[in-house]
């Protein structure tokens, strides 16, 4: 099972978090998931944040988890970045 991310929205707050806490640049996270075919993922139902997709990617040769929330968009396949961190 794979997920399609046509467009990835990254808020300023989330960009600041992934850069400061995890040392990742928003553009490299976007490049790892946006318009990339065959991304493996799993759904996760968080009690406070709701349903989200957890995607596993390689960044800088390391495995990372990317947390995506569905965005309200008439085109579809648009996601909001929740977090990105190494595993």
Image (tube, grey):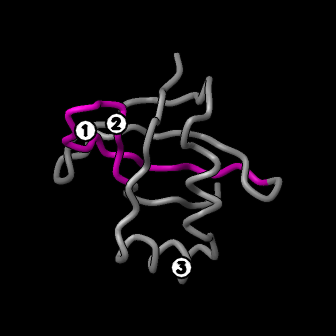
Q: Residues within 10 Å of mark 3 (few under 14, many from 20)?
A: few
Numbered range of the magenta stretch: 62-80
**Position of 6 compared to 82: left or right?**
right
Q: Identify the residue shown where x is 34% and y is 51%.
A: 80
| Location of residue 40 by image quarter | top right
Residue 44's tag is 2
Q: Which residue is mark 3?
A: 21
Q: Examine the residues drawn in magenta and state their main secondary structure.
A: strand
Q: Alpha carbon of mark 1 to alpha carbon of mark 2: how far?
A: 6 Å
Labelled pair 1, 3 in contact (Cβ < 8 Å): no
Q: Residues within 10 Å of mark 2 (few under 14, many from 20)?
A: few
Q: Alpha carbon of mark 1 to alpha carbon of mark 3: how far?
A: 24 Å
x and y percentages locating residue 10 in the rendered image? 40, 62
Q: State the SS at label 1.
A: strand
Residue that protrudes farthest toward the front in the picture: 75
Q: Judge whether residue 63 is colored magenta.
A: yes
Residue 75's tag is none
Q: State the SS at label 2.
A: strand
Labelled pair 1, 2 in contact (Cβ < 8 Å): yes
Nearest to N terminus: mark 1 or mark 3: 3
Q: Judge whether residue 56 is colored magenta.
A: no
């Amino acid at each position: 099972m794979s997920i399609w991310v046509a467009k990835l929205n990254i808020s300023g707050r989330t960009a600041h978090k992934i850069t400061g806490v995890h040392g990742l640049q928003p553009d490299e996270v976007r490049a790892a998931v946006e318009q990339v075919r065959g991304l493996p993922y799993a759904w996760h139902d968080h009690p406070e944040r709701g349903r989200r997709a957890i995607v596993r990617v390689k960044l800088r040769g390391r495995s990372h988890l990317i947390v995506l929330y569905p965005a309200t968009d008439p085109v579809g396949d648009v996601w909001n970045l929740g977090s990105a961190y190494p595993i």
